Amino acid sequence: MKHSTLTHQAQRGATLIVVLFMLLLITIVGIIGIRVAITSLNIATNSQVGQLLLQTGDTPTNQFLNVANYNDLTVLSGAIGKAIEENKVAPGKEIIFCYRPTSNLKLGSALDTTVLVPPAKNDPANSKATIDSTQTNRSGFCDLEADYGSARQAVVTQVAVRIPTDAISDANPGSTLARDTDVSLQSNTSKGKVEARVRVTSTAIMPAYSTENLSTVQSECIGSSSTVGYINDNIDDAVSGKRTVADCLRSYGIPVNTQVQEIDLRKRDIQITAP
């Protein structure tokens, strides 16, 4: 009788061990499943963030490219025209503005721009820009808490226009000269002469991911009514290696997408009637 009781107790103990072992396996499998799901979700989220930043950063540059009239693009009341004019006096400056699609002003209006003076070539890499003392307008700085590009309030886009100071390294000789010049009948009609090279740097920003208070990021990276941040374009030799707005934002965990578009402005004057 005692032997039978001991046998039943041993069986119950063995059953309990098996049940506990199965529960342990189920728990492990569940944890692995959750981790895989979280990883997949993170990958999907990162992909969506990247796609949204890419699309938003494209928008201001495409609006410039879609301007058909040369004079409309280079007028002094716009960012590109202002950059061309500033380059004649002091090459290397950045004309910056914030992409504000809900604003009544046209894209890159000079009234909404700020003129940044980059640090000198021999200055430390983490040197910040300064503002031209004769042009103190600061409305070109994006507000990370207000200047969203859509009602989703997700992405802020800072844009910089700069006239490149480096020569085109891979250009063929004479590539920027006029094409199809007509000198017959004492006329001189040029088509396709490169009047200016313009580089547009668009930085799309998702402030919600910041690991720091946005007011601190604003002051440190971009600039505000009382501070100046970093340059946006460090491609030319004179500013090569200098810290940019995008570099600063990334250091605070903020996702950014920087797109650079270099544009050759060609004036096309076509003679309709003989002079």
Image (tube, rainbow, N blue to C red):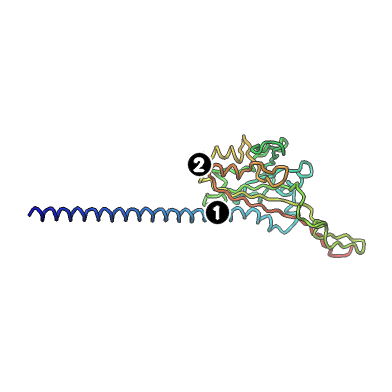
Residue 96 % position (x, y): 67, 45
**Residue plotted at (83% across, 58% down):** 178
In the foreground, 81 or 127:
127
Given residues 254 and 8, the one toward you in this image is 8
Q: Position of residue 143 (x, y in %)?
A: 58, 43
Label located before the other in sequence (2 or 1): 1
Which quadrant holds residue 215?
A: top right
Distance CA(mark 2)–CA(mark 1) = 18 Å
For residue 145, the mark is: none
Pick the quarter of the image with the C terminus.
bottom right
Q: Is residue 222 above or below residue 273?
A: above
Residue 168: image location, x then y, percent: 76, 52
Quadrant location, the N terminus: bottom left
Q: Is 135 in front, or is 222? A: 222
Residue shown at 77%/52% (left/top)?
A: 196
Q: Secondary structure at mark 2?
A: loop
Q: Are marks 2 and 1 in contact (CB under 8 Å)?
A: no
| Amino acid type, mark 2 | Thr
Kind of residue sitting beneath label 1: Gly
Mark 2 surroundings within 10 Å by alpha-carbon count, few (fewer than 14), some (14 through 19), many (20 or more): few
Residue bearing mark 2:
211
Which label is found at residue 50?
1
The single residue placed furthest to the front in the displayed view is 3
- Kindly state the secondary structure of the residue where label 1 is placed: helix
Residue situated in front as seen by the camera: 4 or 186: 4
Category of crowding for the residue at label 1, using alpha-carbon neighbours closer than 10 angstroms: few (below 14), some (14–19), many (at least 20): some
Q: Is residue 150 left or right of residue 259?
A: left
Name the side, left or right, on which 200 lies relative to 85: left
Question: Residue furthest toward the left?
Answer: 1
Residue 155 placement (x, y as % from top left) = 55, 49
The image shows a total of numbered marks equal to 2
Residue at 70 percent of width and 50 percent of height: 199
